[in-house]
Amino acid sequence: MPPRAEFLTKVVLFQDLETEALATLAPLLIAKKFTAGTVIFHEMDDSDALYIIEQGTVVVSKHVSGDVDMVLTRFAFCDFFGEMGLFDNAPRSATAHVETDALLWRLDRGVFHYIFSHHPEMAAKISYRLVTIFIERLRVTNEQTRDAIRWGLEATGYVSGNQSLFGRKST
Amino acid sequence: MAEPAKIQLLTRKAGQAGFQIHEIDSDQAFLGFRPRRVAKEVWEITAQPRSPDGRRNFILRNLQRDRYLLIDTQESFLWELFDGSIPLDEIARSCRQKFGAFDYAMVRQLLAKLYQAGLLIERENFALQQSLARRHGTYWEMGLNSAAKYWRRISFTVPNADRLCGGIYRYGGFVLFNPLMLGLTIVLAILAGIAALRLSPQAMQFTQLLAAIPWRSGAIMLAALLAVSMMHVTVHALACKAYSRRVRGIGFFLLQGVLPTFYADVTDIFMSTRRARVVVDLAGPLVELFLGSVAFLVAYQAQPGVGQAFLFGLGVLLWEGALINLYPFNFLELDGYNIVADLLAMPTLRQQALTLAPQLPRRLIHPRGLSKAEWIQIAYLLLCLISVLIYLIAHLDFVRGLLPSWK
């Protein structure tokens, strides 16, 4: 059963599409159910689809060292993730874990290419939204990188902090 | 293990056009970094008495640069680990095992403090923050900032203060720190108190005599107060020398950025005992007590006239000065406050209390969660508030009393 049009209109990625386009898109999406704790895809897996969340939450993390992963972000209702898989063949850059039982809709790269060839106007609208969201996420990443580097620079003494020293002036 | 990635940093130096690119290894900027303290001969650490909640602070001193840091038990544990062989992530693990928790923000603050005190092997400083900071703010903000900066610069320091004070102490200053001198001051104060009481019926007459020559009496009184104020800080410094500790400086500055004041920097007394600190704190106000007592006694023996009025007025001002200095609860770090802070082993009581103040409404909802030290900070805040209110109300009454004469 395809996703409800009411749900699709709430997804930012599709918010520029008209009813007719949404009706075309809906049957191309594949429903996937996941239970809490399962992994949707691992870092370095083949990357070939984007996922949209109708129910549940998903945590995306990146391996740092040993058993430690760094949580990159968390997605919920109407969010989407894995969008890099629509455009290139490079392996997944992070791992997606299901935090609470989830119902996801999968948009395969092959289907996305089909939309490009047969519905270019719809593909352009989706791509425009994707680019704006890429930019937004890139800005957040830049901020995170800056904070992490600032921490490191202050800790290693490259940049002086603004700490006051101890002293007593008797008056 | 793979080579660390390179991070390129763009920096601008203050007053220079253009920019520089620096390349550092990413592991230098992150958790693989191994902080290394300076050589053992360059620093010393002294444990302070335990505060009421059982915590112990330490004073860490850079002997070369004469800089001091107040650090707590957790920070002193970290300091021991900064030997250049242990990376930050391992330090974090050790700290977690010992204390049950670890906060990277705390280690960053400690590292920044240590760099500032020159206690860790330093790297090139990019002056990045200073150059970027200049660009922030509107013209108004920049104007106010530079005005505040010039205001804060109203200060001077006597060169070679430690040598000077050492000389004064050796050539006679040591006499002041004899128990007999304390006894003499107390006897003089008792006699002066009796003399002041006997002279007090003439107080109105003295006031009228001085009011008849307002400029002259005001100037003489101000000069006398300035001289006593300088003696006060000199005696603080001499007390520091009495315990063979270094006087870092004597000079003039704006206390809490507002109040023009003479000072003696006696931070080095923290490397000595609590008793030594209390003696240094008490030594200053005893100057006012001693000289005020002398002024009362001479006034008592003097012939009636302007001279007697001036001596009586000076005695009152000096005793009042001693009292204000010894009163600990006025939000200022005067001698009385220092004594309380030393006795409680909470050398940053005022700062801690002011930091706690904005959180109080929330914290008082669950008062059981407050530590003994926090209750002391609350008591300090309350006593300061009550004292300031009483002071204001007393002066409002005084102003109201003057009102009819203005009509």
Image (cartoon, coloured by chain):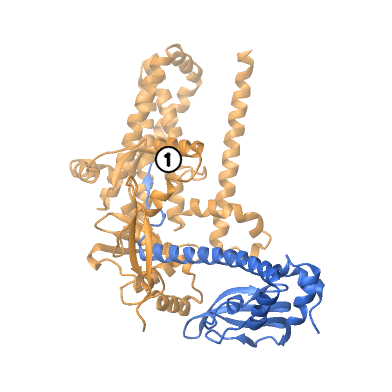
B208 or A94: which is nearer to us?
A94
> Chain A colour?
blue
B156 or A47: which is nearer to us?
A47
Give above or below for B71 relative to B333.
Answer: below
Q: Which residue, given by chain and number where applicable, does mark 1 sit on? A: B255
Image quadrant in which the C terminus of chain B is located: top right
Give the residue type at disc 1: Leu
Of all chains, the one bearing label 1 is B
Q: Give the x, y percent position of residue B30.
A: 41, 71
* Total numbered badges shown on the rendered structure: 1
* Element carrying mark 1: strand
Task: From the rendered image, report the letter of the chain displayed in orange.
Answer: B
The answer to whether B397 appears left or right of B114 in the picture is right
- Residue B405 seen in this snapshot: yes
Give above or below for A10 relative to B329.
Answer: below
Q: Give the x, y percent position of residue B158.
A: 26, 39
Q: Residue furthest front?
A: A118
B318 or B115: which is nearer to us?
B115
